[in-house]
Image: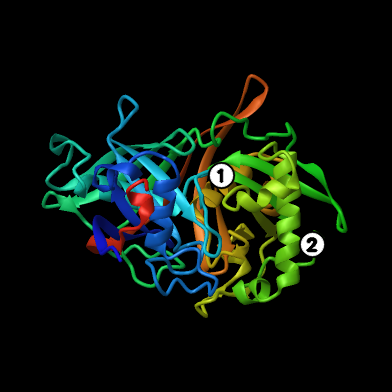
Amino acid sequence: MKPQIKIPAAYMRGGTSKGVFFRLQDLPEIAQQPGKARDELLLRVIGSPDPYQKHTDGMGGATSSTSKAVILAAPTEPDHDVDYLFGQVSIDKPFVDWSGNCGNLSAAVGAFAISGGFVSPDRIPENGTCTVRIWQANIRKTIISHVPITNGEVQETGDFELDGVTFPAAEIKVEFMDPADGEGAIFPTGNLIDDLEVPGLGSLQATMINAGIPTIFLNAEAIGFKGTELQEDINNDPGVLETFETIRAHGAVRMGLIDNIEQAASRQHTPKIAFVAEPTDYQASSGKQINADDVDLLVRALSMGKLHHAMMGTAAVAIATAAAIPGTVVNLAAGGGDRTEVVFGHPSGTLKVGAEAEITDGNWAVKKAIMSRSARILMEGSVRIPASDFLTGE
């Protein structure tokens, strides 16, 4: 049997997610190009596909938040510091989904770009904030990360608290510029609210938006929920999960992301599906009491077929954008009207997000969405995987 090989990497937390970070030049040559070899490598690093859904033999954490990989490379676009490519690794199936971004890990990209040598030293202050210009290669958009610097190095420790993350850290402000995913319109159907026909469920009012990541928003009450649910309320019921997947598949077709519902099985990362409700009191998963007065609305979102323990960063961008546009399902749940920011309740607590929306040439456009996150390196060095045939092209 062939021995294991070592690949330089870092294991990082960004927001409420974790992932394995690579520099493109450190990957085996055959994996420096998109394709089967790269996908097989990342699957082996994470430990997928795992029929036990535990990731015991890999770096993944057996959740959508922790089965992620990031590849950074020299910028291909002018006036940027780094290219950022994100792969959502399936837990129990042999594929990597490259169809979208990870907003949470975006907070870690700026820090890794600095420590990984992608940012010119003359742009890194001795003390202060380094502005890292990131080209998000999956959706071809710009992300601006404001990374705190102390003594010429990334400041990781601090007192910024983020619900869904156990310990405080340094705050990183992240701006998602022109966040409509890819080249599509913010509202692919042209409507703020659509009647989405789903067999067995009838017609559901939905806002289907393309900002940060394509997302389908529903009213919680319309599908039998309150908006206060925690993970065990959803994830322990296979029938409920199947219902959400059915809705997601039909929404994906309506948004033009896939041609038929069968294709949704191989496109798990996008679109996301979420449900919203007006504010009410509830207890977060940590035991923290969230009062109705603390938030503008409640949001619960599913990722890779399971209810997320907090909120995906890209979905938070979608929430900020939808909340800023009067008449969407999200905006109405928050009380309607013009808004530049909202505080929403999620299973782990609350999050404040903002967006600047305006009508341009008769269509809604969003200049940017803003949120604060934190990030830190958990481990760095090398990952090891068996030197399988896919790395040699045999």
Is 130 drawn above or below residue 306 in the view shown? Answer: above
Which residue is labeled 2 in the image?
Answer: 223
Q: Residue at x 56, y 44 (%)?
A: 213
Q: Residue at x 68, y 22 (%)?
A: 362
Disc 2 marks a residue whose amino acid type is: Ile
Disc 1 marks a residue whose amino acid type is: Ile
Real-space CA distance between mark 1 and mark 2, rounded to the nearest whole angstrom: 22 Å
Q: Secondary structure at mark 2?
A: helix
Side (left or right) of 383 relative to 161: left
Q: Quadrant of residue 380?
A: bottom left
Chain-order first, disc 1 or disc 2:
1
**Quarter of the image with the N terminus in it:** bottom left
Q: Residue 377 in the image: x percent, y percent?
A: 27, 61
Q: Residue at x 53, y 75 (%)?
A: 52
Q: How would you rate the neighbour count of disc 1 (Cα within 10 Å): few for under 14, some for 14-19, many for 20 or more?
A: many
Which residue is labeled 1 in the image?
Answer: 213
Side (left or right) of 93 relative to 370: right
Side (left or right) of 194 relative to 339: right
Q: Residue furthest top?
A: 361
Of residue 150 and residue 241, the one placed in the foreground of this image is 241
Q: Residue 105 in the image: x percent, y percent?
A: 40, 53
Q: Secondary structure at mark 1?
A: strand
Q: Residue 157 in the image: x percent, y percent?
A: 24, 63
Is 203 drawn above or below residue 361 in the view shown? Answer: below
Q: How would you rate the neighbour count of disc 2 (Cα within 10 Å): few for under 14, some for 14-19, many for 20 or more?
A: few
